[in-house]
Image (cartoon, rainbow, N blue to C red):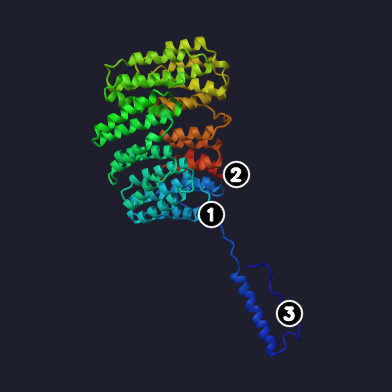
Amino acid sequence: MFDTMVPVHTSRFFWQPRLGGVVVFVTFLVLSVSGCTTGPEVERDPGPPRTGIYHLDVALERVQEEPLARVIPVYARVAVNLASLEADEDQLDRSVTIARRLDARISRANDLRGSELLEWAWMWISLASLDEAYGERAAAVSSDVVARARSFPSEEAGKLLFRLLKAQLANPNIDEESIRRTLDSLYLLDNDMVRARFLVEAAELIRDQGDRLALNPVVQQAIAIVPVIEDPTTALILKVRLADLSLTLGNSRDARSLQDQALRRAEQGLLVRSDDFEQIRQVLRYFLSQGDRPGAEAIIGNIAPVSSRAVAYAILGTVALQEDRRLPFRNYYDEACATALAIADAEVRARAVAAVIRLRTEGEPEWSPGATIAELLGQTSVSRFDQNVRIDVLSSLTAALIMANRSQEVARLRGLILSADELAHINLAATERLLAGNYREGARELLGKIERVPFPLPGEEQSPAYRIARLYLALDEYDRSIPVLADAERGEQSLALAMIPASHRLNPATVTDLERLARNNR
């Protein structure tokens, strides 16, 4: 309704009983009222949806005025979190209400990133997995995401489509046509290397999770593309993974041919980055499983830079130990240490030696890292390093000592640490490494030693407070995560709260902390 009102005249002349004047007045009045009721309506913000669960309601409230990029993951995770509780009651009323509220906000947005679209699709797929009544909606959202992915660069589109396929294959209530549409879009990626990589990822996913799609066509399509890939490292990794898939299909001749081709590509030289190490582990495991130890050693001999070669030797030691203890795994570990210690650049040397020590401790828990740590610190001035390098090195060494049940020796590293904030960052990074290696008790103990939330380091994407809270959540210490969140960003607070199970009942002290958090910056 507009604020301007029609003026009312009370003069005797205006109210004279003239038919024409009455008609004009009535007509004017009708048009005025009509103009008020049919004008553009101002959309009112209905406020955050309510779940009746305090920590989830605070999560939704605090993110309400944030950009959509922060709203999407919070709404999606609250909906799925709540649905897991509602499923026991055979109805998903509140969770579906939140999902539809998110639908409304997304319908008005045109520039969503792949990660945001994935959260949206994952939400509906998860709801459909709990109640098949929402299978049609999950399929419709999946189709929308596939359509939007066509406008993305190949790398982003491939990542989005693969993760969507993974979510779909995990849900028995998604129709097969929707899954095939996603896979077909992977075939149409316009970059050969990206297409081959994600087809291999999809093939491994189909083998491990799905029985609704034929594996052989996907593998054959990837095999046809791999020869055009120019980068030797990428080609080596994909050929070995395809060899493994071919064995699954019973195509031993294809597997042997791909294995030989991989070795020929390795001879061209392999530039290996830290992001490649897990896939190098897969390559080395395949060669040892096929009894081709010389092939595995030849691959490592062609790896550059030297720091990556040292780490690869440590990986080979662990793989050899797991495959067959009769293999010379200790020789590989010793070669890894010797190679790393011989690196000329002090910072590169320290990072490589620390990584090798941690890998060997993970693979061979009975090994004592003390002597190698002492050798490294005796020849390298770690305290003079750039702070990020120092944190990386000392967190790796801290994690290694705890893995080896030598946590009392961690105190020897204190003299290299320059501040209380730096100590907190080192313990935080070491805890993350311990948890990634499934050393939960060691991670819990070290996390408890972080007495303060440190200042963020330059370039960090996530605040230290959020990282600490996430660790508590991963360790099922839900109540301990909330006080830490006071130092996190608003969007991070909501995201962490959204991940606390809907069924969890906070203790009274934690409720007080949460009330304080909810009052701040309202």
At a point 53% along the width and 15% down the height, the residue shown is: 346
The image position of residue 95, as x and y in percent, is 42, 52
Circle 1 — which element?
A: loop
Q: Amino acid at mark 3?
A: His
31 or 88, which is in the foreground?
Answer: 31
- 295 w.r.t. 175: above or below: above
- Do we see residue 392 in this rendering? yes
Q: Amino acid at mark 2?
A: Asn
The image position of residue 69, as x and y in percent, is 52, 46
160 or 449, which is in the foreground?
Answer: 160
Q: Which residue is mark 1?
A: 47
Q: Which residue is mark 2?
A: 521
Q: Which of marks 1 and 2 precedes in the sequence? A: 1
**Horizontal side, residue 51 vs residue 452: left or right:** left
The image position of residue 470, as x and y in percent, is 46, 35
Q: Which residue is mark 3?
A: 9
Quarter of image, res 220: top left
Circle 3 — which element?
A: loop
Q: CA distance from mark 3 to mark 2?
A: 50 Å
Classed neighbour count for the residue bearing mark 3: other residues with Cα under 10 Å, few (<14), some (14–19), many (≥20)? few
